[in-house]
Image (spheres, rainbow, N blue to C red):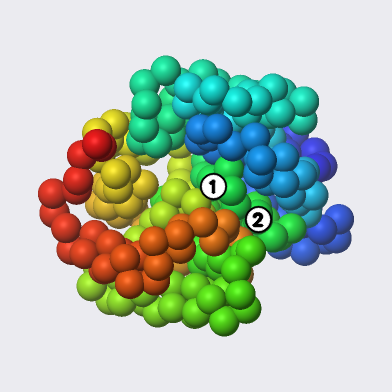
Amino acid sequence: MLLSPEGHYVYWLDGRNEDPVTPPMKISVIVPAYNEEKLLGNLLTALGQQTLEPDEIIIVDNNSTDHTAAIARSYGVQVVRCVRAGVGSARQAGLEAATGDVILTTDADCLPQSTWVKHMALALQEAIAVYGPLRFYGVPEADAWFSEYGYKAFLQISRLSRHPNLAGSNMGFHRKPALEVGGYPLSYTREDVILGYKLMRRGQVKYVPDALMLTSGRRLQDGWSRLLFKNFSDLFNKNPKAYR
């Protein structure tokens, strides 16, 4: 990070004089977490190895009963306590606590590639919100391959239908307009996608193919058929399901 002649911060990517992230942009990463002591350390290690370091990392402890908060503090990141159960409430608590110009979000069981922050930050210079691809880890290679390319196909269908699927596990947006539209709904399961719809009315939403995020294969515990049915049914669901 350098100081420009005008006195503004300029983030040079990978330590080389290429594609600086300008104008100055403070980056916050928000992660909701509930009983994630087994995987959270892996995520925080990966965030600490980014070619473009975020300015702040906020772990939202959503009433964990294990050592989630202690592990987060051991990495020197900010911990926000959210007593209202639900990922929408947790993401909203993180949004309200963040001080960054832009917000990047992921989940505690995810592993961002080393250039994830860089690619998302660059895209946010041209868009109000951005999102990227996902790939399962910890599963057989065939499942990992299908998860990546099947999800890319799903995202393409979503874009063509004008229902972009901005998943909170790999999403970014500008903080000020997100707060202006009310942030995340607190009582819905599709809180991330709904915020994306709100932001789409305010500006451009952009897909970032290079911002690959690895995510835990535990989402496959009920099988592919159930996962695919849920994703496609949610795509055109105008009345998102309430938390149960």
Above or below for 205 versus 139: above
- The three-letter code of the residue at mark 1 reads Thr
Task: Indicate the quadrant where residue 150 lies.
Answer: bottom left
Instruction: Name the quarter where the C terminus is drawn.
Output: top left
Instruction: Name the quarter where the N terminus is drawn.
Output: top right
Pinpoint residue 72: horizontal percent, then vertical percent: 68, 29
Above or below for 212 versus 94: below
Question: 10 Å neighbourhood of mark 1: few (<14), some, or many (≥20)?
Answer: many
Disc 2 and disc 1 in contact, CB within 8 angstroms: yes
Between 52 and 112, the one nearer to me in the picture = 112
Pinpoint residue 95: horizontal percent, then vertical percent: 46, 30
- In the rendered structure, the answer to whether residue 52 lies left or right of residue 232 reads right
Between 217 and 33, the one nearer to me in the picture = 217
Pinpoint residue 87: horizontal percent, then vertical percent: 40, 36
Task: Indicate the quadrant where residue 100 lies.
Answer: top right
Q: Is residue 163 visible?
A: no
Above or below for 78 versus 232: above
Q: Which residue is mark 1?
A: 106
Q: Is residue 188 visible?
A: yes
Q: Which residue is mark 2?
A: 112
Please report the residue visible at 59 percent of the width from the left and 37 percent of the height from the top.
36
- In the rendered structure, the answer to whether residue 171 lies left or right of residue 113 reads left
